[in-house]
Image: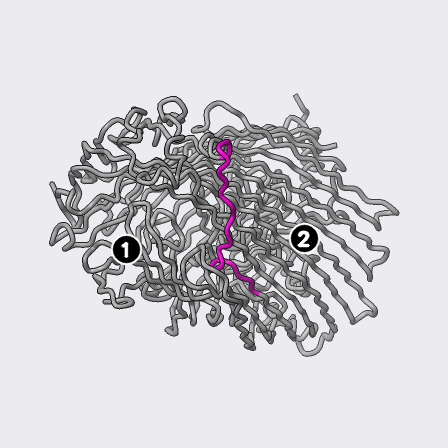
Amino acid sequence: MLSPSTTKARRAVTGTKLVLLSAGCVAALALGDPAFAQTDAAPAAQAQDDTGGDIVVTGFRSSLASALDAKRKDIRITDGISSEDIGKFPAQNITEAIQRIAGVQMSNINGRGSTISIRGLGAQYARTTINGQTFASADFKDGFRYDIIQTDLASAIQVVKSPTADMDTGGLSGTVNIDTVKPLAYKGPRFIVGVKGYNSEYRGKEVTPKVSGAYIDSFAGGTLGVMANVSYQKLKDRGDYVFIKNWYNAGVIDPDVRVPGNFRFRRIDRDTEQVMASGAIQWKPSDNFEALLQGEYSRDHTRYTTRQYVFGRWASSAVKVNGKANGIANNITISNFNVDNNTQPELRNLKTQAYTGTINWQPGDTWKVHAVAHYTKGDAALYEWASIDEVNFAQGGTLDISNPNNIKWTTQSLTDGSVWNNTNRTWFAFVDGATHIQTAKDKAAQIDVTKDLGWHGVQSLVLGAKYHHESFATNAFRHDRDGDVTDPVKFPEFNYIPNLGTTGQLVTNFLDGAMSIPHAFLSTNADVWQSLLASKGITVPDVPDWPSTYRVDRYVPAVYAMANVDTTVGGMALRGNLGVRYEHTHQNVTASLTDGTGSDAALLGQQHIIQDYGNVLPSASFALDLTPKLVARFAAAKVLVRPLLNSQTQMADTISTGISQQKRPFTSVSAGESRLKPLTANQLDLSLEFYHGRGNSISVAGFYKAVKNGTFTQFYCPTSYNGVALNGVTTDCQSADLKSDYSFSRVLNDSRTIHIKGVEFSATENFDGFLPVKGFGATGNITLVDTNSSALGTGFNLRDLSKFTANITPYWENEMFSVRFSVNHRSSYKQDAASSFFVNGGEIHTVRARTQMDLALGFTPNKWLSFTGGIINLNNTHEDAYQTTADTFQMASRTGRTFYLSATTKF
């Protein structure tokens, strides 16, 4: 047993090292970009240690204290987390760690955190930077995907909610800056090596590995520092989903209620292999000169295997309504219908790289020069192909959704391969799919000159300029071969279709045995189908999909001026920043003009749509130290977001026609998006923060945004098209004779002003002052958001908005052991087809409220070795959705728990 004096000495050494490391993380935030550098101009009063006793500052508590120190010293409205927080919090990726920041919400894919939203605005409205500069998102249509970033990359993360004039535009909801380690700021062991194992509950007993290593050192008397970090990991997970995608409107089948139009099973297995590396060289030969070169690289290779049963779309004449409530038919019988057995593999190969060179130079006592050159590129190669078999279920089935927690589906056997035969077969496709090759680039140069004044409270003036060229390009292709069972001469593969009973893949324990549905089914084997097609000498080439091929170039010069304020008002310290930024945007969209016959359309030529616009963007941020412990903040700014791109973006007007899988003619008309205006918003922020003791605080913040020119997708159905009378039903647009399907959509700017307002509460507290056992504490936050935005599809809307979110993490730790239990809650939120596959065009569903619990355990036997284990989604929560009313089923999912165990050594 250690003596009291030895224990106290170890505390001092450990605490000192961790405080130095945390201080390095905070300092790193100030070095990466002038947006962060200027906040150091007038540091806040030092935190007062009023606990009156010996404080044990270890890993998690140190990270909380570090984040609060950074928040207190900043003049802006910010929140953040530091390296110990990310490294030891139960998280597979940065998304799952960052969700604890006040106002941040996380969205899942297969149960793995993937994207974030801040203060109610979707992922596309949060700008993401690394070391203060753009980090290209390889798959730029999906919003920034945080799940491709391993936690090892970051030393600290800061969410800036009120911008200053020297920050790049694009963060309507906020800017997330991920900072990497700067070598000379790190005071610790030179080598860090870690191993980790993951197990996803629904993928069986297989454990996937992660290995990581970092080297950090300094030379030449501490003037030259180097850092290299590399990590490799594999992940496997699975998601099971049952859902209704199509609905018949009232009056089609039943005069009073909407009726489900089909029912689907969907299982997604995901296998991921990731490599991430970062490096830095930092040279500081004197106090007045520093040069820094940083590089980051991320590679994510993921295979999705989707196995899906589509029951229907059943004919309206085959449906009998047995029960109804709340405007919905909740029990129906279908006399017979066709079933699609669809297996779709998808490869997503993503790669992003970024290189940043920074010079900080002080040529005189009152002059500072900051210069940055930056390049980043993201590449995405997305391939999908599906093998589809369709037969008729002559015995029909019964669907009962009267209890959304236990839906019932009764139909014939899903494991009897004999049903899938040529006599019963209605349609097939050996291969249907798409290829998308995407590239995002950003090249930038920036220079800032600061003149220290110390004149009547104006501490310094900053003049700066930045030029960057960003480009987004996608080349799209289709590879489709839809077979006709009535024409075996044209489609000889009709006679080669594999026997499902011998080649099919059996899916078991579907939806984890929940609900009264079949929990096993045979799925087609896409790899066998396509290898068989190749063996018969039948090829399906990639054909250019011109309507989905485009390029966007934006050339953006900007100039800005700021005044940093450091004065006193009534004996109270006032720190602040006043600034204005002017940006000119020259945008060139290259779109494809086609003959209007769909994805196989012939290219008629290219169209260049050019836009030029300039924007003046003022900003102001002030922090007033009311007392040594109480800080009040005010911030106001005008922000700009240029037109965003997503998976449904098409730049040219397109008209697609064809025959659907259900043998129904369809026509799809989509208006191009090349002339959309940028979104702007005026925003205000106020906060009051109380700091008491190191690492303790209570704060409340209010925010308001007035948004103009927000975009929205409008689905509509005219009364006629090209001389054909239509039914006029937006969510089920058909010809008046109900024999052909139509879809009409356009993306528009909303000229109305949309108001967003909200309140954030956060607190961090250690309980050493009033508990006999040391080491207990908690951190948490609550965010409330409200808006007057229109209903989805009628105007700019904050889809994925949870009006209430809450996070709390109680913990206990000492020098050797730690326990953390985290609870994350978000209230219900709405989605449309733009944000969820499970919603049909023109429809809306509401994802139910969800609470997730995570547990992390730590063991550190000495200063060189530590172990961490935990469970993500301890309470096995899942995302479900309802249609129309809260007691109406639309979608249910299961993704299971994730278990992990890691070991890290430092030397």
Residue for badge 2: 354
Type of amino acid at the residue the image marks with label 1 = Asp
Determine the residue positioned at 63% across, 35% down: 232
Label total for image:
2
Give the magenta part as a residue range: 534-552
Depth order, front residue of 610/123? 610
Whether residue 630 is visible here, answered yes or no, is no
Q: Is residue 851 left or right of residue 468?
A: left
| Mark 2 neighbour density, 10 Å: few (under 14) some (14–19) many (20 or more) | many
Residue for badge 1: 741
Disc 1 element? strand
Depth order, front residue of 104/257? 257
Determine the residue positioned at 34% across, 53% down: 830
The spot of residue 326 in percent (x, y) is: 16, 49
Q: State whether residue 536 is above or below residue 178.
A: above
Among the 4 quarters of the image, the one containing residue 560: bottom right
The spot of residue 745 in percent (x, y) is: 35, 63
Determine the residue positioned at 26% across, 60% down: 730
Would you say residue 166 sits in the magenta stretch? no
Type of amino acid at the residue the image marks with label 2 = Ala
The spot of residue 526 in percent (x, y) is: 44, 33
Q: State whether residue 273 is above or below residue 563.
A: above
| Mark 1 neighbour density, 10 Å: few (under 14) some (14–19) many (20 or more) | many
Disc 2 element? strand
The spot of residue 48 in percent (x, y) is: 61, 53
Depth order, front residue of 199/163? 199
Location of the C terminus by quadrant is top right
Q: Earlier in the sequence, mark 2 or mark 1?
A: 2
